Image (cartoon, rainbow, N blue to C red):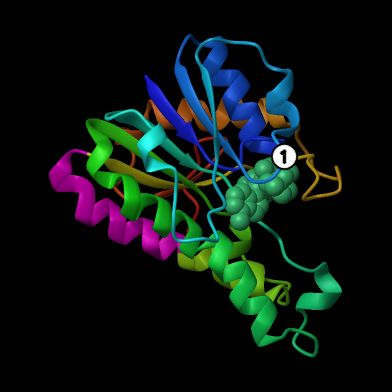
Amino acid sequence: MNILITGANRGIGLGFVRHYLAGGHHVWASHRDHAGGLSGIENASLHLLRWDVANDAGPVGELPDSIDLLINCAGIYGPGKNGQELQSITPEVMQEVFNVDCIGPLRVVQLLHERMARGGVIANLSSKMGSSADNSSGGTYAYRAAKAGLVIISKSMAVDLATEGVHVLSLHPGWVRTDMTHNTGLIDVTESVAGMADVITRARQYEPGAFVDFAGRVVPY
Ligand SMILES: NC(=O)c1ccc[n+]([C@@H]2O[C@H](COP(=O)([O-])OP(=O)(O)OC[C@H]3O[C@@H](n4cnc5c(N)ncnc54)[C@H](OP(=O)(O)O)[C@@H]3O)[C@@H](O)[C@H]2O)c1
């Protein structure tokens, strides 16, 4: 398969890169300023791209004509919990997080959907934090709203791209030990990625636009 992964220089994105290279696939891995963990991988099937999904332009010309799997992994949490409370949240923080976590994947898909192969899959990394059904603790306004918005956008993409034979899912990776969680998660990147890759392999067993966690469970939203 030809696979594009955004936000691939560390964390879950880097885990996806390692997983799919080990499976013999061709991987286009995008990063912002620093190649990070990607620079240590020597594999002729790995192609590095610079892509900041907060900007409208993307390196489309460096990508293959046919993409089988697109994983929108790039994301930010925004300020820590205290900076996202009712008293502290600001329009600027809302806009910054929304621009990366929600509009970012939309930009990528707008630029690339015509290159998606019939039978292809788009997996958008949301979070259970974006599920209203799962929200019992409040707060975290920007991250919750952006990840909820991504689930809604993914559903529209799933409907719109069905005629092109492209299946779209939102994924929840679990609570994973990465920089984003200050390594406080319950599972490691390898377990999260293996679970999500299994869901992606079985993607069409799920409704278009479904929100699915790393263990294959549908997340109510
Ligand atoms: N870890 C968890 O428990 C968890 C739970 C639920 C959902 N998620 C989601 O899973 C995804 C990956 O999370 P992670 O834990 O691996 O996070 P991470 O370790 O903080 O890595 C985030 C990645 O996104 C990239 N990124 C940030 N802003 C970007 C931008 N504007 N353009 C392009 N790339 C950008 C970062 O690149 P730089 O190195 O340049 O900053 C980095 O590669 C995120 O969407 C996150 O919200 C994670």
Where is residue 201? Give x, y as percent. Answer: 40, 25
133, above or below 194, in the image: below
Where is residue 174? Give x, y as percent. Answer: 66, 43
Q: Which residue is mark 1?
A: 34
Judging depth in this view, the residue of 95 and 119 nearest the camera is: 95
Dominant SS of magenta comes to helix
The part of the image, by quadrant, that contains residue 173 is: top right
The part of the image, by quadrant, that contains residue 152 is: bottom left
Judging depth in this view, the residue of 44 and 27 nearest the camera is: 44
**CB of mark 1 near ligand 1 (< 8 Å):** yes
Outermost residue, front side: 61
Q: Is residue 94 left or right of residue 178?
A: left
Identify the residue at horizontal 46%, vertical 54% (top origin).
105
Quarter that holds the N terminus: top left
* 218 inside magenta stretch: no
Identify the residue at horizontal 29%, vertical 61% (top origin).
156
- Describe the element under mark 1 as helix, strand or loop: loop
Where is residue 198? Give x, y as percent. Answer: 48, 25
Q: Is residue 143 left or right of residue 121?
A: right
Q: Is residue 120 left or right of residue 90?
A: left
97, above or below 166, in the image: below
The local crowd at label 1, few if under 14, some if 14 to 19, many if 20 or more residues have their Cα within 10 Å, is few
147, above or below 217, in the image: below
Outermost residue, bottom side: 87
Tell me which segment is drawn in magenta: 150-165
